[in-house]
Image (cartoon, rainbow, N blue to C red):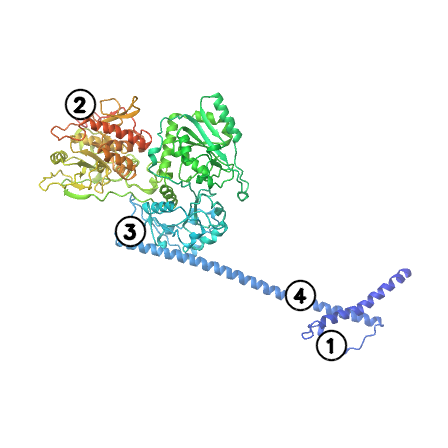
Amino acid sequence: MVAVWKTLRGPLAGLLFLCGVAVPIILLCFTNTNESEPVEGISSLTTRNHERRPLDYSDSKDKSEVLKFHIQEMKQIKLSVQNELRELEKERSDLYKDIELNRDSLALLRKQVTVAKSDLQQTRSKLAKAQREENPLAKGGFTPSVANPAPIVVVNIPPRERESIITHISVNHHHCEYEDCFDFSRCAISKPFSVYIYNLHSPFSSQFELLDSNLLDKVTASLTDKHSITDDPSKACVLLIVVGPLRTPVEDLPAALKTLPYWGEDGTNHLILDLSYGKLVQLQKKRTERAIFASVFSPSNDYDIILPPILKGSNGNSWARLPPHLPALRPTLLYFEGELSGKFDSKFGNNEAWVPTDELKAIENAILTKSKDKVVLKTKCGRQHSNDDPANSHTIQLGEWKLCGNSEYRTFNLSKSTFSLILGSRTGVLSTATYTRLIEALQFGSIPVFLGVKSLPFQSVIDWKRAAVFIPSPRVGELHYILREIQSDVILEYRRHGRFLWDTYFSSTSSVIDTVLAIVRYKAYYPPPSAKDYIDAKPLLRVPGTAKQRLSPIHQQNFSAYATRFWNHPPGPFYMYPLSPFTSSPVSGSQYQGLTPTQVTRLPAHVIQAGGITGPFFQDYLLGNTPEEQFTVVMLTYERNEVLMEAIKRLDELDGLAKLVVVWNSPSPPPQNLEWPTIGAPVEVVSIGRNSLNNRFLPLANIQTEAVLSLDDDVHLRHDEIQFAFRVWREARDRIVGFPGRFHSWDVRHSSWLYNSNYTCELSMVLTGAAFVHKYYLYLYSQWMPQAIRDIVDEYINCEDIAMNFLVSHITRKPPLKVTSRWTFRCPGCPENLSSSNEHFNERHVCMNRFVQVYGYMPLLYTQFRLDSVLFKTRLPNYLEKCYQFV
């Protein structure tokens, strides 16, 4: 122990000396750092040290006391610093709380502003609606043609409750949906679907390259043709921005969009129409917020629209250079010619194209060696390559297949090919060149065969499987077998529907832009504009009727029923026709349920007694699935006054006749001394102002029934024949139902179609000189059918009845219905008519072949039966009578 003590004594003595000397020095340093403001505790210590006598460090007892004193002082300093830190932390916490409270207040104020704006918009809408109800003819008033819609119930949610209902909407463009990002209050169903077009020459347009002037004119013309254009952006449902290729980096575009005067905070209800051939592809990866983006680049959501390329020179009337649908199998089974682009851009990420070069070569070799089918599968363009094509010069997709040759070169090859191969990328994303290949294939009747394709133009509304063949990429080795298994009738239907898609949605600049706006309108659940009656007919005369008119129910269209078929079926989605022949029949017996005892006694005998009905009881009641209905007779006449008067007299007291409309085709008005007979129903005479057989099928506002009996003034029909034909039409409302039957035949020697009126066991037409048609087809004939067909009718002053048969068969894919044994009509004593010469028949041959050229195929279908009345030629007991004695 002594040895240890001697060893440690020296260091311990030094340590004690340092504690006695170094600590006071450190304390003095702290006290002298700021002489003007001495630290509390330390200053008192210093004062006390001055008052004390100097310590004698030789005394070990005094040294320990000094050391204890300094330790105590240090603890006091530590405690004081901790207190100050606590106070600073409390102040910092209070500041953070104030910031959060201010944020919440700001968010609440913003919500209140949003709700206030919505309330203001609703108030304005209610005010406008009240003004329209007060004055329905006021400017801007609009009433959609729908079938007795239920009243709209507006639920006013208090602001506080509304805040809890409204969910947070992300401004990220890729997560937009119509329910989230589209402002439905701007598109009230009670007012027109209006579009505001931003000035294409505004300062904002300086961000882009100048668009082709012809293209701009087409854009403007197409918008002002079918859509309600407004100069007031506050009244617009959609605000359209037409942009071309960028002058500035795409990164600057979101900021440029915010400079638009009506962009607002997030671009709600804005539609960006990208005509830059896909150069704005990177814009979709930016924040375009709630604006709808229409571009050739396929989006990752259903909010945006895949736009087909608007090709230069597109013309909706270019049918004259289109190949016919027949024959089904063309010389080349499968056609593909393209060259893979070598331009790769890292901006697109890992998007390597699917390049089946070896597979295509193997398929071509196998088909050529093992079958007689001709295929063209080239992966190098060679001399046919053309960089002048916009689809090539603006290609953006990695590994995109360039087009070979110019449009004339591709047209020649596609017109001779049954199928056209459309290759996709590994991700299925396509761009301008591939979409151009698709549109050209539809145009020239080469059925698209998609291999590895996922995204297509307007795919949210178009059923592409009705016009194209989809084959998974792993099935590429079995491509030939799959195509050879497709039957000819299926090929023709593919081709026919493909022509409809091309003609309706892709044939011109107007059709593309109309489709884009129609998609926006459709997804916003806004009905298309109603087709209008022809109201320019000049009334010449009205003879009032005296017979009691019965209620004739109208099967009006509404948007919910019409939207199920109008995108993928002629005539397309651009108009809503007020009447439809495709309305489903009511549930059997529904017309008899819930009647009062008095109403029950008025029912037909066969309903009350359940014993059936014949003879005169049948004539007294229309019966059928619709108990009451009437028809309108439309009679076209030209300077045959005596014949006309006799024809009107034959309609006297015709049961079911609602009105007779006489279309006066003569340029001179009726003579003043002409005595018009009264026939029980009103007679209205109208003049169209020009002599045309197309006037027979104008959707006149005078026609207020679905059933229209088109009748020549020299046709003699008994009342029972007309009533029987009317009853048949009511059970086949989508068909032409009439008396004189005709058919078409193929002339092998001249490779053309012939019109034939001989007696035959087959027929494909019923002449509209005596036939029932639905008023719906009058709209289609005058407003949708190609103008070229109406021009042909005017050129020959002939063939309007053939044109109507072509139209109805094209729409329904059904033949007409012939009733009774009548095959033709004779008019003894009538002046010479249009159909009395051989030239008339020759013209009808020509008309038929020209109509086929317009449609691309022969739409007429054969039928081998006619309809006679129930119980006709049936032996009945003496107390029963036939429905019609001579029909």
Few, some or many residues within 10 Å of mark 4 (<14, 14–19, 20+): few
Residue lying furthest left in this view? Answer: 673
Label located before the other in sequence (2 or 1): 1
Which is in the foreground here, disc 3 or disc 4? 3
Are the residues at dot 2 and dot 1 in contact (C-beta closer than 8 Å)?
Answer: no
Identify residue for label 1: 47
Q: Position of residue 332 (x, y in %)?
A: 42, 26
Label located before the other in sequence (3 or 1): 1
Amino acid residing under circle 2: Pro
Label located before the other in sequence (4 or 1): 1
Label located before the other in sequence (4 or 2): 4
Measured Cα–Cα span from mark 3 to mark 1: 96 Å
Left or right: residue 748 versus residue 436 is left
Amino acid residing under circle 4: Gln
Element carrying mark 4: helix
Identify residue for label 4: 82
Few, some or many residues within 10 Å of mark 2 (<14, 14–19, 20+): few
Measured Cα–Cα span from mark 3 to mark 4: 76 Å
Residue located 11% across and 41% down the image: 671
The tag on residue 877 is 2
Which is in the foreground here, disc 2 or disc 1? 1
Few, some or many residues within 10 Å of mark 3 (<14, 14–19, 20+): some
Amino acid residing under circle 3: Gly
Q: Position of residue 434 (x, y in %)?
A: 45, 37
Identify residue for label 3: 141
How many callouts does the rendering have? 4
Few, some or many residues within 10 Å of mark 1 (<14, 14–19, 20+): few
Which is in the foreground here, disc 3 or disc 1? 3
Label located before the other in sequence (3 or 2): 3
